[in-house]
Image: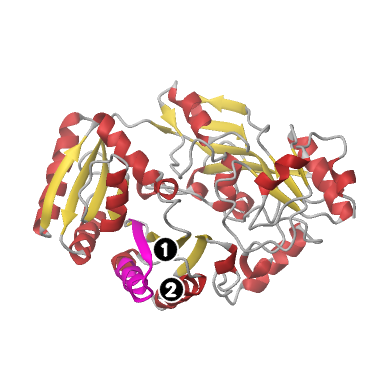
Amino acid sequence: MSVDRVVSDSTTLGFEELAKFQVDGVKPKAVVVPETAEELAAILKRANDEQVAVTPWGGGTMMSMGGIPKRVEVVLLLQKLNRVVEYLPEELVVTAEAGITLENLQATLAKNGQFLALDPPYASRATLGGIVAVNSFGPICHLYGRVRDLLLGIRVANSDGSLTSFGGRVVKNVAGYDMKKLYVGSLGTLGVIAVTTFKLCPMPMFDATFLAAFKSLDDLAKASHEIVSTCHSSIGIGPSAVEGLDPNSCAILACNSFDIPQDYVLALRVLAMTDGSLRERIRELSGITSKHESKSAFSVEGAEHELLWRGIREYPQLSSGRFSVRCKVSTLISKVGEAMDAARKVSEKYRLEHSSVAHMGVGVLHVYLNSSDPDMLSKAVQELRTYVLGAGSGSSVVVEAAPASVKLKVDVWGPVRKDFFLMQGIKTRFDPIGILNPGRFIGGI
């Protein structure tokens, strides 16, 4: 095994830079910076021949995700794969390399009144390849969908040195297996994403925020359920985001200059094609929240509106110095409120600092926990997971960020399912030697 042979003829970072690219405290032996997809594939071929483990690295925003790696030998830093390959505004399609940041891509698209309808945290640093690899998304997934709904095509560098393309530039471009979706959320364990193609959306004509504060989580959940069930496109456009915030998350947002009540708050992003339909939608939402005993309700627009949603979108970054563990809970839409309450009870039981932010309309909740005691954190995660798994229907708890001391005590992905053997078979077929992010994905693959 020779790392030197793997990184030969490629740009590498100096020894003093290696510490910046640790994964759960494991420092790589080299960091290589490919400039083209072909060079990326060649590096993977050499790594496979030398049986050297490689770790893809985009903006580094989600490197806390995954289990403790078995090996971190060569980091593939994709920052130079940052070009827009093809942009067709009239087709609402863009093809760009995996290392371009979402923020830079959005700036290009905005010149034509378009955007990629993804709003994950860390947009200034998050890269397209990383967003696909971890299936990262934000509040507007309620209307626009998630990565797999917007991804049209993908080009991947494989462990054998080949480059493979899946999908194309049209919405229905697959007559057989839709292979590109296999890479969404795969954490770089099947191949390294080099190029992505996404469908785009026009920027909304009218956009505002409606906020309602409630005395209880139960009232918030009931109001959210009615809004999600009844507010559709009969008036303008349905809400693009339906976010549930607990008092602790509201307090953190308030500390960062966001004007928001420190209660249980329902935040809705309201879109419309006309100003009249926007006002009608807000009146409708006001009526629903009032029926469910909201303490207060109001709307904001303009700079204040944008500032608030930036805070909600970037909440993981705003709260990163306060919470050491972040969990993503996926459950039934009707169970999100109950999951928020379970997170509160578990946190109080183990005397943890906590906060919760929920995508109420899609069944996803982020729970933030903190304690100086890794045992208490681990027990809290296990107890929350037991509750969520009891909801059935494929519910899960994934630990997206945690200190290594917690990861040693709790499986970040949770128990494997009965179909895990299929995942093992796919991993073996795509990466037979196991050089791609070994140990970090489900079941340690």
Residue 368, how many percent across, how many down?
Answer: 41, 60
**Res 292 seen here:** yes
Residue 417, how many percent across, how many down?
Answer: 57, 75
Residue span colored magenta: 338-358
**Res 272 seen here:** no
Q: Residue at x 63, y 28 (%)?
A: 83
> How many residues crowd mark 1 within 10 Å: few (<14), some (14–19), many (20+)?
many
Callout 2, which amino acid?
A: Ala
Verify CB contact (< 8 Å) between mark 2 and mark 1.
Answer: yes
Residue 391 in which image quadrant: bottom left
User: Which quarter of the rendering shows the C terminus?
Assistant: bottom right
Is 352 colored magenta in this rendering? Answer: yes
| Mark carried by residue 381 | none
Given residues 350 and 45, the one toward you in this image is 350
| Residue tagged 2 | 380
Task: Please report whichever mark, 2 or 1, sits nearer to the chain's N-terminal start.
Answer: 1
Tag 1 secondary structure: strand
Callout 1, which amino acid?
A: Leu
| Residue tagged 1 | 369
Q: Is residue 400 left or right of residue 69?
A: left
Given residues 344 and 438, the one toward you in this image is 344
Residue 227, how many percent across, how many down?
Answer: 22, 54
